[in-house]
Amino acid sequence: MIRNKLVILTPEGVRFSFQMAGLASRCLALAIDLASIATISWTVSTALRIFSIVSDEIAGALLILSFFIIGISYGIILEWFLNGQTVGKRVLGIRVIDMDGMRLKFHQVAIRNLLRSLDSLPAFYFVGGIAVLASRRRQRLGDFVANTVVVKISTPEKPDFSCISSDKFNSLRKHPEIIGELRNRLPQSLMLLALKTAMRRDMIEAERRQEIFSELRMEIRKYASIPAEIEEDLSDERFVFNVIDVVLKDAGRW
């Protein structure tokens, strides 16, 4: 592995290359996130002041508890639901991913955020900053334990869709709500894998190709509620092609 660059080779033979996020971009993202946490905390504290009518002690305890919960849950909730991003990471164009290219798991998100208290010692994320500078993968301690890395989000070159057969009667086009769900929820890495696999399908043995498209289909279905009647007559390969058609080709996401 080249320093500051992560290369992942999937079982299907597709190679992904990621540029590590630098310390400066991560610090700026952290500053934005701290500002977001402060804003949320101020809003919540304002609402909780009503409890001072009953008891100043109760109000104070609730304030302390709310600050703790917000500080811990902010990163966990956003990174889980926004596919590895917080407000700061999204603004700076960086993302948390699994070290092996697998789907980011909840326990990974939880661990890397719970260990922020250790990375922040003794102050101003000194331990975490030193770890990032010393690591080939620019990982802080939380990333080491969670097996995650923070990478830059790159914009792939526009692919040639002409080599992918098109279904003139793509059944998904009749369901804009499903298309919207697919476009909003499917990770870019998964769609890139589907596209690259589709483009090189003729180089894959027939039996292995069937297995790969079946796995892609199952993975895609995790992100959208697609009624059985829409896809029951579609082969795995045709299903993946139809998704590529409405998510990437029609939407002009490249």
Image (cartoon, rainbow, N blue to C red):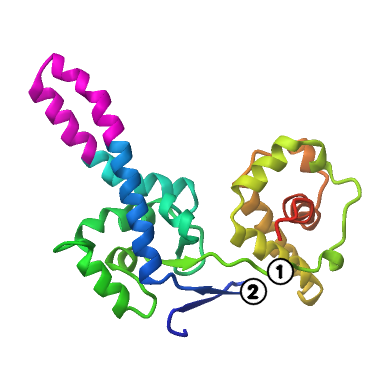
Q: Which residue is drawn at 36% across and 49% down?
A: 75
Element class at badge 1: helix
Q: Where is residue 137 in the image (x, y as percent from the top left)?
A: 39, 76
Q: Mark 1 points at which residue?
A: 196
The disc, 2 or 1, on the residue closer to the chain's N-terminal end is 2
Q: How crowded is mark 2: few (under 14 residues within 10 Å), some or many (20 or more)?
A: some
Q: How crowded is mark 1: few (under 14 residues within 10 Å), some or many (20 or more)?
A: some
Residue at coordinates 47% horizontally, 67% vertically from top-left? Answer: 151
The amino acid pointed to by label 1 is Lys
Is 41 placed above or below 203 here?
above
Residue 73, position in %: x, y?
A: 32, 43
Q: Is residue 219 magenta?
A: no
- Give coordinates of residue 233: x percent, y percent: 83, 45
Q: In this view, does 232 lie above or below 26?
A: above
Does the magenta segment cover residue 59?
Answer: yes
Q: What stretch is highlighted in magenta?
A: 42-67
Q: Is residue 154 above or below residue 78?
A: below
Side of 39 where 173 appears, left or right:
right
Classify mark 2: helix, strand or loop: loop
Q: In which quarter of the image is residue 44?
A: top left
For the question of whether residue 53 can be seen, the reply is: yes
Query: Residue type at mark 2?
Result: Val
Residue matched to label 2: 14
Instruction: Using the numbered discs, state the Cα–Cα distance from disc 2 to disc 1 in whole angstroms.
Output: 7 Å
Identify the image quadrant of residue 197. bottom right
- Chief SS of the magenta region: helix
